[in-house]
Amino acid sequence: MNAPDSLPFDDTDPDGLDEADLPLVLLVDDEVRSQDAMRRTLDEDFRILCASSAEEARALLERHEAAVILCDQRMPGLTGVEFLREVRERWPETVRIVISGYTDSEDIIRGINEAGIYQYILKPWVPDHLLQTVRQAVEARTLQRGVSRLELDLRAGTTALRTRRGDRLAQARATFDFERIERAPGSPLDAVCAMAARVARFDLPVLVLGESGTGKELLGRAIHYASPRADGPFVLENCAAIPDTLLESELFGHKRGAFTGAFEDHVGLFQRAHGGTVFLDEIGETSPAFQVKLLRVLQEGELRPVGSTRSVPVDVRVIAATHRRLDDEVRAGRFREDLYYRLAGMTLQMPALRERAGDIAPLARRLAGEVGAELGLSGVEIGPEAIAVLMAYPWPGNIRELRNEISRAIVLGDGRRIAPHDFSATVLHGQTGRHAPVGAAGAAGLNLPGLPQSGTLQERLDAIEAMVLRETLLRHRWNKTRAAVELGLSRVGLRAKLRRFQLEDTPASAGETP
Ligand SMILES: Nc1ncnc2c1ncn2[C@@H]1O[C@H](COP(=O)(O)OP(=O)(O)OP(=O)(O)O)[C@@H](O)[C@H]1O
């Protein structure tokens, strides 16, 4: 039998981590060897306590607040699930994980409800998976505790958050509200915004993934203004825009004389964001050397400006964004795994515009209004044929490209109503060179990933009709006779439709081959 451990605090921790801040994990297993194996897997990230029986575990839980309990299903006297049921009642905030072999699965499945088991791990377990599961369990507990705290606050009628914020904040909140992230009802963005709004309330780091121009920054701002840090600053740095050495001084500051050209002390963005949020755009572009420095600041909650001997405490929430798949970057060894886990408290994925073609119509109308107003034109409209053209294009540059296209159309058009011929040939003919045109189908049939999910029936049918016409013409290299035959139209009928969608009279449509 293993005696219960005393807490393994280590004053000489080489990482400079105060172990007292690490979450406590209780391992319950009567086999010393598997206890040891688990401990070795987890003890860099957590404080560990071990018990060999339910009795010992109870005694430890009475004295220490464990974030997570990992319990073997086979124990002398009672099963892991039975013990975890008791843990749920007496220590409900401790997240419960059971470890078992295949044969125990029925009992475990019952236990998922009865004992509120967060996760079960099958033997033989894989160290990475075990570590990952415990990390997630700790995060889940942090979220759950935050929810409970909020509920308590609400019940007590706490209005502190609201009263602290003034008009300026109210205005910023309205501007960067999740509702202002334009989308159609039922858009995939609904789920992203709902998750972001939830996580906004908790002080977790957030990683926003998504192609360029999908609205990652907009989402980051909305998170900040929906968070308890909303009355603190929101500062943004594009990590890809400046060289590595400057990035460090830009973010963490420098002392006068720290390097050639450092004529004065410089306060970095992290210090300026104290009490607020730092948005680190294009984090995937940073060098390994910079990643180490950032990790240290995040771990220690303090920074040392370049050339300084003194550390300064900083309290910021970091929201990082990248167009890269950061987990792939980690696997390829280009991004530090430990930093990845620090940043990815919660990961949000912004879908590309082509994956939510239903959003194009409301977005285009909104952007036409916004850009029109910037240009001093009010009430700029977009006709249904123009919307159909926009919906048939795959938008590799996402909303930023859509905004540019609409600006162009307003400037080149009559300034009142945007029509298809106001768009660039690229958009009119769906040719990006980077992605297959939406609706471009093989001989097997028509694939319509951009099937419109909003708008009136007529608008949606128009969008589909425009896509089908364009796709057929592209495939027949703009040979109208062959396209008409395939579509069962007369040449005159096809021409009328091309005129209607203004696909006919552009130089590109006359000569362009796909
Ligand atoms: N859903 C939306 N509603 C309204 N405007 C949007 C929406 N999404 C993005 N935009 C606008 O599109 C432009 C690009 O968005 P943003 O800068 O947030 O994208 P990003 O993903 O951070 O781009 P990058 O990775 O290139 O920095 C901005 O002008 C933004 O206001």
Image: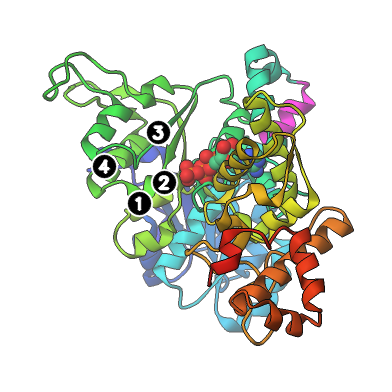
Q: Distance between the residues labelled 4 and 2?
A: 15 Å
**Amino acid found under the numbered disc labelled 1:** Asp
Of circles 4 and 1, the one toward us is 4
First in sequence, mark 2 or 3: give its number.
Answer: 3
Can the viewer see residue 92 in this picture? Answer: no
**Amino acid found under the numbered disc labelled 3:** Glu
Task: Point out the residue furthest to the right here.
Answer: 457
Could you classify mark 1 by the number of other residues whose Cα lies within 10 Å: few (under 14), some (14-19), or many (20 or more)? few
**Amino acid found under the numbered disc labelled 2:** Arg
Q: Are marks 1 and 2 in contact (CB under 8 Å)?
A: yes
Point out which mark residue 237 bears. Answer: 3
Point out which mark residue 290 bears. Answer: 4
The secondary structure that most of the magenta stretch takes on is helix
Q: Give the range drawn in magenta.
A: 148-157
Left or right of 247 on screen, residue 209: right
First in sequence, mark 1 or 3: give its number.
Answer: 3
**Amino acid found under the numbered disc labelled 4:** Phe
Task: Point out the residue furthest to the bottom here.
Answer: 444
Q: Do the residues labelled 4 and 1 touch (CB within 8 Å)?
A: no
Measured along the vertical axis of the image, is residue 485 above or below residue 17?
Answer: below
Could you classify mark 4 by the number of other residues whose Cα lies within 10 Å: few (under 14), some (14-19), or many (20 or more)? some
First in sequence, mark 4 or 1: give its number.
Answer: 4
Q: How far apart are marks 1 and 3 (CA)?
A: 21 Å
- Kind of element beneath mark 1: helix
Q: Position of residue 462 (x, y in %)?
A: 80, 61
